[in-house]
Amino acid sequence: MTQPLVPVILAGGKGERFWPLSRKRRPKQFLCLDGSDRSLLQSTADRLLHVANGWDNLWVVTASHLAKGVQEQLPELPLANLLVEPEGRDTAPAVAWSTLEIAKRYGESAIVGFFPADHWIDNQEIFEETLAAAVDLAVKEAAIVTLGITCNQAATGYGYIEQGEKIGLYGAAGYPAYRVDRFTEKPDRETAQAFLDSGRFSWNGGMFVFQAKVALKELHRHAPEILTPLEEKGVAAYPTLPRKSIDYALMEKTDRAYVLPVSFGWDDLGDWAAIERLLKNADNPNVELAKHVGLDTKGTLLYSTNDDELIVTIGLEDTVVVRDGKVTLIAKKDRTQEIKTILKTLHTRSEFEDLL
């Protein structure tokens, strides 16, 4: 890379769509969901360590109730590199605060990258080549770079980035980069299909690379209500900060936004359907992450946290069955998005508090 990258892992999410496996103090990023023995957080750290040149330059920002879990999962992470938010205020405050702290340590010319803790990424070599190109672009164009994920379906659950003018090739591998024409958040099915057909759009994967000084200047311009209190009071300003995503607070407003389309395999592992996409085997009609005996069962995902428990199914199709402790979830696959609705109901029942 032309300049070292300081990666920051965003690890404050709830992962409610993976309930009952994902709980308040054991959210999705702490879980092993890809069939390996590494959690999503640990896999993300593994992926970024080489880029960061070791633990001293890898950072994590998380919520206060998750800080202990992060330390347990990443014991090698220096305590000074763990930024603990007293309360969640969405991604804009997390990015602004992290960038300020990194600029204090490394200087405002530091290159900072932000990476969600819950992504699955294939092909480490291409991933690192892409980040090298993003660093090159960030330095040469004073760019705020977003990594654009290749669209392979008309998905309505992702934000979309429209590619504008092509501005050149970056990094040793010569990756093309484009100005961002616009961001569109979670379009309807017809619009998503039109975006896919046009060939000009990428999914917004929530990964960003920029020089600290460029992002801070743009945050001063477009989100002073977030940056100024953090400059004046540091983390103590959090209770007064608005709850905004970095997309809304900055990326949709700045003229420094560029998109670098990626070619590595990617999934955001956002719900149980993503696990099926990742682990589906043509030789098995089901995805089995549990001890399972089935009769006339197909298209079903089964998960248990206890290897001694047996799940038996008869006549199930296109279903999700998850067993964790005192909770069993059984849902049709096309309705797993409604888990959040169930959780709202459970939050009103005090007897279920320990299950959330």
Image (tube, rainbow, N blue to C red):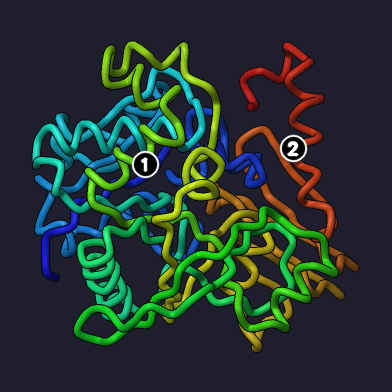
> Who is closer to the viewer here, 107 or 40?
107
- In this picture, residue 325 sits left or right of residue 180: right
The answer to which of 308 and 132 lies nearer the viewer is: 132
Q: Residue at x 33, y 46 (%)?
A: 9
- Tell me the element at label 2: helix
Within 10 Å of disc 1 (Cα), the crowding (few <14, some 14-19, many 20+) is: some
The earlier-in-sequence mark between 1 and 2 is 1
The front one of 227 and 112 is 227
- Quick one: quadrant of the C terminus? top right
For image coordinates 81% across by 44% down, the residue present is: 338
Question: Is 104 displayed left or right of 14 in the figure?
Answer: left
Number of numbered callouts drawn: 2
Residue 13, how many percent across, how many down?
A: 50, 38
Residue 1 position by quadrant: bottom left
Q: What residue lies at 31% left-to-right and 74% top-to-bottom?
A: 130
Q: Could you tell me the amino acid type at mark 2?
A: Lys
Residue 8, image x and y in percent?
29, 46
Q: Amino acid at mark 1?
A: Glu
**Residue sitting at x 53%, y 66%:** 267
The answer for how far apart the CA atoms under marks 1 and 2 are is 35 Å
- Classed neighbour count for the residue bearing mark 2: other residues with Cα under 10 Å, few (<14), some (14–19), many (≥20): some
**Residue 343 higher or lower than 321, as above or below:** above
Q: As displayed, is residue 150 above or below residue 341?
A: below
**What is the quadrant of residue 189 in the picture?**
bottom right
Q: Which residue is mark 1?
A: 218
- Relative placement, left or right, of 73 versus 49 is right
Percent of width and height locating residue 238: 41, 16
The residue carrying mark 2 is: 340
User: Where residue 171 appears, x then y in whole percent?
Assistant: 23, 79
Viewer-proximal residue, 209 or 324? 209
